[in-house]
Image (cartoon, coloured by chain):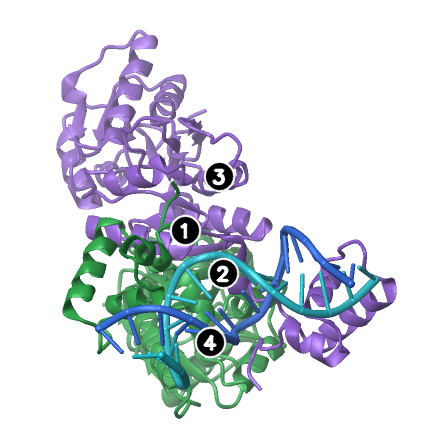
Chain colours: A purple, B green, C blue, D cyan
Amino acid sequence: MKLGQVTIKDIAKALNISSSTVSRALKDYPGISEETKSRVKALAKEMNYRPNAVALSLRKSKSHTIGVIIPEVVHFFFSTVISGIEEVAYANGYNVILCQTNEKVEREISSVDTIISNQIDGLLVSYSKETTDFSHFQKLIDYDYPVVFFDRAPELGDVVNVTVNDFSGAYQAVQHLISQGYREILHLAGPKNLLISKNRKEGYQAALKDAGLEIREDRIIECPLGTPEESEEICLKLFSDPNERPDAVFSSNDIAALGALKAIKSLGLEVPKDVGVVGFSNWQFASMIDPPLSTVSQPGFQMGEKAAQLLLEMIDQKEAKPTQGKEVVLETELIVRGSSQRK
Amino acid sequence: MKLGQVTIKDIAKALNISSSTVSRALKDYPGISEETKSRVKALAKEMNYRPNAVALSLRKSKSHTIGVIIPEVVHFFFSTVISGIEEVAYANGYNVILCQTNEKVEREISSVDTIISNQIDGLLVSYSKETTDFSHFQKLIDYDYPVVFFDRAPELGDVVNVTVNDFSGAYQAVQHLISQGYREILHLAGPKNLLISKNRKEGYQAALKDAGLEIREDRIIECPLGTPEESEEICLKLFSDPNERPDAVFSSNDIAALGALKAIKSLGLEVPKDVGVVGFSNWQFASMIDPPLSTVSQPGFQMGEKAAQLLLEMIDQKEAKPTQGKEVVLETELIVRGSSQRK
DNA sequence: TTGTAGGCGTTATCAC
DNA sequence: GTGATAACGCCTACAA
């Protein structure tokens, strides 16, 4: 005997009734005598009956499964998002099928094929860095197939997406530094070609401007690599001249902030007394280093939850009125820790 | 018109032939004229035909999908494993369905149900901390359903599993501490019901024994939670008495090691001068804290790959001779950093 | 070389 | 109240 092989037919045969009666009894359909109902249910339980989800999918063209296309699982932020997706899916009786693209368009395209073939009910996407042509997604959207983009949102019309407010996250971080009395704030910026870098830089500039502080171009340094070594080197130079020294660092990511912290400490400066530091992303290590790093937390879990919720809504409403062109922007949270708390 | 709705029937109708002919033509079955074959293929391409994987699953009772049951996605090690699994699955045309248990048995059990209902071809499992009763897995194994355990392997007979050599990893770590001159080595152990905890503890004990050092039961403290706070508190107590103080810590995981580090530093002791610390897992933060944490690195990606390969083999051989009782043990790598390098 | 007729497990529709 | 039948999309004996 094999696993999960008990079917409605088996129950029907054993009870000498038709399979339709069994089906109805199990589903509490009206018009079935209480007696039959309870006999069927009892036997089903005894035989350890499990409905065959595949047959159901075929019958109803609905698989109760959602797909997730993601660049890399091994990425703290993304795995947090997956976790949020998983929670919502589980709570609603949906399964999650995972497709990792490793930042390759080619795999993205083949994943979309898989999604279609398997009658997956909807799709959550964070597209790859390589992706510039979105036709494989556009095709889905054109057919009103439920798709929600998260984190990386394409510039397509009528697309549902969930992103983070990088501008305001940066703004708050810098505002906080100013409130702590820091005035000469250095910005370690991310790669120029990423939209998030641009938004964070603009948030930084806006906060300075609104506080009536000068915006100096030589206080914005790009860190293309984002390694601690890179920013450590940069900061060693910048902080060694006592006259022209910044008194704070706002970094576009925690890793670069870490390098800055090292450099500052090695120059004999105290954090947060002499120099304040704030990072971005709230990596796990942020709370663990000395001093604990203040940072802007991106709500990855929440992003996953929200994206999944939206998707499930779209799936439910599919026939009715498709949710379209909806953009959800999640707010970041400034987490103040020892590296910037002066008072 | 809806998505992926083109079926074999549609093609058959358009070409005025029977659907079985279409089916055979698409699969290059013998006994189909070249002409029909090419006409069918051309139209299939033009109509963007995609075989319905659900119908195939039902027909063949094979879904080309494997399930992964994992405690937490947001865990550097586990996400690395998933990544390895994904790679192998993708390379072999399999999909991956993900079930996160959040360390709850209850969710584990319901995940197994999902797996069965959905005709998933095989299962990769790392069970939850709560799991002490394995009957939900045993049931599967009894029916020759392909299951491979990874990282956390149950003590059941005839089970296929892929683990890390926790014993030797721990042994090497402690041996290293001893070689650095540490003598009074504290062990922060993991949850008792996990085999990995047991093996690491035994590795610790063996290393002490082989070096002719005393094994003291009061130098082995269980940290069931594994949070930094928990181990910090424990270490604050243990290291405050100068006479009875350990001079090193071997922790069953990096997080607990971190708490130990905090406690030690806050007591004014220097690492690695006064106290040496070695963790386990090589979390990302390990290299970033001060001092950088020595640790035992686990080959997560490789573990995922190996586990997936074994599972696919079992699926293929299912009818023939089931792979059974196979144990693959991967070696760890000791990474020596500042927290234990005294010389 | 092609068509016909089941059947995978389930449920909706009709009939009795 | 219950049963027979068809259908979801595909494959595969068996017929022709």
Q: Do the residues labelled 4 and 2 touch (CB within 8 Å)?
A: no
Kindly identify which residue carries mark 4: B196
Amino acid type, label 3: Gln
Amino acid type, label 2: Cys
For the residue labelled by badge 2, is the local secondary structure a helix, a strand or a loop? strand
Seen as rendered, the residue at the extreme bottom is B321
**Chain assignment, label 2:** B
Density class for disc 3 (Cα within 10 Å; few <14, some 14-19, many ≥20) is some
Report the side of A38 relative to B160 (left or right): right
Density class for disc 1 (Cα within 10 Å; few <14, some 14-19, many ≥20) is many
From where the camera sits, is residue B155 visible? no
Q: Does label 3 or label 1 sit earlier along the sequence? A: 1
Q: Which of marks 4 and 3 is in front?
A: 3
Kindly identify which residue carries mark 2: B99
- Cα gap from disc 1 to disc 2, whole angstroms: 13 Å
- Cα gap from disc 4 to disc 2, whole angstroms: 22 Å
Amino acid type, label 4: Ile
